[in-house]
Image (spheres, rainbow, N blue to C red):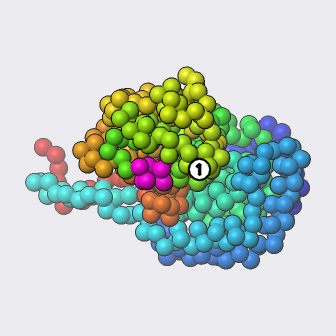
Amino acid sequence: MNMAEPVGPKSADLERDMVQLGERARDAAALLATAPTEKKQSALRAMATRIRASQAQLLEANANDVERAQGAGKPASFIDRLTLTPGRIEAMAKGLEDVATLPDPVGAVMANWQRPNGLDFTRVRVPIGVIGIIYESRPNVTADAGALAMMSGNAAILRGGSDSHDSSTLIVECLQAGLADAGLPKSAIQMVPTPDRAAVGMMLKGLNGTVDLIVPRGGKSLVGRVQDEARVPVFAHLEGICHIYVDKAAGLAMAVDVITNAKMRRTGICGAAECVLIHHDVVASHAPAIIGALQSKGCEVHADPAVGAVSGSVVPAGNDDWGKEFLDAVIAMKSVSGLDEAMDHIARFGSQHTDCIITDDAAAAARFLNEVDSAIVMHNASTQFADGGEFGFGAEIGIATGKLHARGPVGLEQLTTFKYQVRGCGQIRP
């Protein structure tokens, strides 16, 4: 396996190669659409076996990626996302096996009905086709994305970040070997073989009509480019500006625990809380403990004057703190007059990703869950549960905040569409 730093081909060759990549994916997708569940499950288990058997090579390849990233001055958080360890490789293999245990959505009957004229209508799930997945530095996304696309009957074209090229290349080779072991086409999972950014533009244009869907997974600049340039449908979220509203009927201990976890468990993920809104009736009783718990974990709190008045150790919030995705140990905090102002603030500054209410008032919780227009709305739970695995989807290919087709964690079911099967016995329309 050649682990040398990749060099992009000339533009004419690149366009030819990318179109051929798409054509191979389209042909593989046609075969996957009718592949038996057992064969797809067998492929996933074989992929896991190949990943485990390649641990030494994966660690060596990843060391090359990490060394280049460190030489380029990448921050520690980036290096952590890029790094593979024996434990992370095992988790990757286990994730493949977990996907194999999930119900196959392809062919599932969504609805069935009969008309008075005797026609029988069935709506069934079918694969989307060819999915282009564009992501950044985390090598494990390569395995997750390939597995979810294949199990849902779709072919995948993967374009990972150049920083993880050696790791992702070897992972894809393991996935393709697993496909071959199960008698499925290796071209069902392909990786764009160049770091040339022009390849991304070609994917976004659809590769001569062979790409049916684009899923970007990464930072704001990547997702923004995809949403701006794509000529095919996109599942994505631009930012995860997640809010937690502490209602006047919120228990203090729960508020402290949930907010601390929602912010500090992992600060750099899209489900991390970025803003806390506190009912003014409980600012004095609740804010000091919440702020103290966050600060004890190393979090910097930017607060409005009402919250700052009960805690002198906060940073005064500026206008740009509202609607900001910090992705770091920083959080904004604001006093609000009640549920209506909290929901107005979320509507104005949120990103329709994940928002939460903490309250023992069932009526307030019901209003929040019904009226907040976000992909995921929560009651008394950490926003860090905004994850496909935590939803029972096995894994996710990303979070979608759009309103068409898929919303929230994108798992197997969300990677399918549907068609209608109509059965008759010679009916003609009058």
In the visual, does 350 lie left or right of 4? left
Question: Where's the C terminus, which quadrant?
Answer: top left
Q: How crowded is mark 1: few (under 14 residues within 10 Å), some or many (20 or more)?
A: many
Look at 84% across and 60% down and name the residue there.
Answer: 63
Q: Is mark 1 on a helix, strand or loop?
A: helix
**Which quarter of the picture shows residue 184?**
bottom right
Residue 197 on image: x %, y %: 74, 38
Residue 109 on image: x %, y %: 31, 62
Look at 87% across and 54% down and name the residue there.
Answer: 67
Height in image: 60 above or below 264? below
Height in image: 354 above or below 427? above
> Magenta includes 306?
no
Question: Where's the N terminus, which quadrant?
Answer: bottom right
Question: Which stretch did the figure color magenta?
Answer: 252-259
**Which quarter of the picture shows residue 248?**
top left
Instruction: Residue under label 1, please give it.
Output: 264
- In the image, 42 versus 342, the foreground residue is 342
Residue 402 on image: x %, y %: 45, 39
